[in-house]
Amino acid sequence: MQIRLYNTMTRKLEDFVPITPNHVGIYNCGPTVYWDQHLGNMRTFFNSDMMKRMFLANGYTVNHVMNFTDVGHLTSDEDTGEDKMEKGAARENLSVWDVANKYIKSCVNDMDLLNIIRPTHTPRATDHIKEQIELIQKLEKLGFTYEIPGDGIYYDTSKLPDYGKLGGQNLAELRGGARIENNNKRNITDFALWKFSPTDAKRQMEWDSPWGVGFPGWHLECSAMSMKYLGDHFDIHSGGQEHIKVHHTNEIAQSEPIVGAPWVRYWVHWAWLMLRDGKMAKSSGSFFTVRGLIEKGYDPMAFRFLLLQGHYRQPMEFSFESLDAAAAGYKNMVRKIADLMSQNDATPVNQDLYNEWHDRILTPISDNLKTSETLVVVQDLLKNQTVNAATKLALVDFIDDLLGLQLRDRATKLRDAESEIAPDEVQELAAQRMTAKQTRDFAHADELRARIDSMGWVVTDTPDGFKLVKKL
RNA sequence: GGCUUGGUGGCAGAGUGGUUAUGCAGAGGACUGCAAAUCCUUGUAUGCCGGUUCGAUUCCGACCCAAGCCUCCA
């Protein structure tokens, strides 16, 4: 099936053509690990997961790389900001290294809970200092670098004629809008490749280099690690929307002089998950984390279901109201599938219908990841009267692979819960209620139902008598 | 201030030059003593003003508003 993706570089929807047939290399800019990842962070990981699943469903092999930024970087190139890793270490009274380990672990855990397939590689910046230094050396040889004494090694953006092509900006524009200016930099857009450690304070993370003790610039790690794991040229580089103008622009500037342009074929950017008041912040604490949702009683799949309803290029507004709606919608879907599993229909899978629906489901998501349209087809399928249960269930397995909604798993759990036999005392109360009903003593019947409910069971009436289902 | 996206019903959120998805919520109905579940039916929207067009929510322009980026950020 022809895959199409919106390429930020060309600002066009393009047919995807892989470098190697039936294989795709994807790099996704990962998080800085100084705090728990919030739901907004998870949305971008989810989106790159959806892109990967789409490729897998189309028969591709996928090499998916997502980095962990565990080097603390100053919040600006002007030496004015704080180092987030060092700040996190101070906050928790841990070493910088322990902070990184702790939050990588929690990030991976939350991704697992959201059923995000683990990337093929999750390299850490601190494990690739050597590769980063080598990149700087290559750039140095090519004449792209200069030193600001006591500060660091900088990249001279004026040496690259098409600098800024990804963000569609020019130097004059930036100069006009600039708020801060580092007088030591040759150009406003120049950025650090290597920062020297301060002379008056000891950094927890610092390394030797040909230029002196210090630490690498932020943009460097993604260039170094993507090329190490995906080759000098690869298919897709993705990341949050905010990376277009600075981070990815600078990655291109560092990489293309070395490997030639175009370095990467397709640039894909994920829009943010917003709150009504604005952007989500890490300082919101655990309120907006996957584990926070679980503590509030939500299934992470409800959140996944919510995300699937939007489009990755469009900001989405998060609220507990919309999450509730998604949770209800997801639950209804699971209910229907559990019912399918309980049907005593011996009709086998209809291969023609399976193929037809398989393609209907795969088509919209292959077209620039229109997951919401795929969801519509799924709803149509579940409602459809002509597709038998076996075919639907076979398609549910395909849908689970494609969308990662764990429908079969949740439906199985629901069915198991419903088939659990109630304890004798509950059975006894239900039988009494049936008697009360038969004698039309409805007040007593309702009272018994309330008692059964308080014991954790729900009694429902069927043509064959009462049924007891454990409350979930 | 500059740049970039958007403004769709109660909420979230798609698509489309002419019959406007889907999910949740709402209303009515079937079923039930009442419920639950399920099924059926159904109302409600395209920021504002112009323009192009037989016809615009969709294309073009102005305006208003919102979000993001311009400083680390998913």
Image (spheres, rainbow, N blue to C red):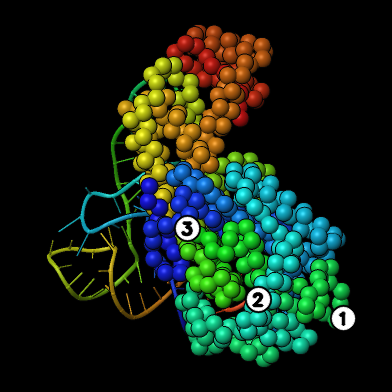
Q: Quadrant of the C terminus of chain A?
A: top right
Residue at (60%, 24%) from the top-left corner? A417
| A360 versus A201 height, above or below | above
Taking the image as shown, residue A430 lies to the left or right of residue A312, namely right
User: Can you give x and y, in whole percent of width and height, for residue A122 in the image?
Assistant: 66, 54
Look at mark 2 in the image and give the residue it sits on. A138
Q: Which amino acid does the dot numbered 3 rest on?
A: Ile
Looking at the image, which residue is at 77% across and 53% down? A102
Q: Is residue A362 visible?
A: yes
Residue A393 locus on image (x, y percent): 45, 28
Question: Tag count in the figure?
Answer: 3
Viewer-nearest residue: A448 or A427: A427
Label 2 marks a residue whose chain is: A
Tell me the kind of residue under disc 2: Lys
**Subunit of label 3:** A
The residue mark sitting in front, 1 or 3, is 3
Question: Which residue is label 3 attached to?
Answer: A19
- Answer with the quarter of the image where residue A253 lies: bottom right
Circle 3 crowding by C-alpha within 10 Å: few under 14, some 14–19, many from 20: few
Q: Tag 1 or tag 2, which sits nearer the N-term?
A: 2
Q: CA distance from mark 2 to mark 1?
A: 30 Å
Dot 1: few (<14), some (14–19), or many (≥20) neighbours within 10 Å? few
- At mark 2, the secondary structure is helix
What distance separates the C-alpha of mark 1 from that of mark 3? 49 Å
On whether disc 1 and disc 3 are found on a single subunit, the reply is yes
Amino acid type shown at disc 1 = Asp
Q: Which is more toward the observer, A208 or A285?
A: A208
The chain identifier of the residue carrying mark 1 reads A
* Residue tagged 1: A200
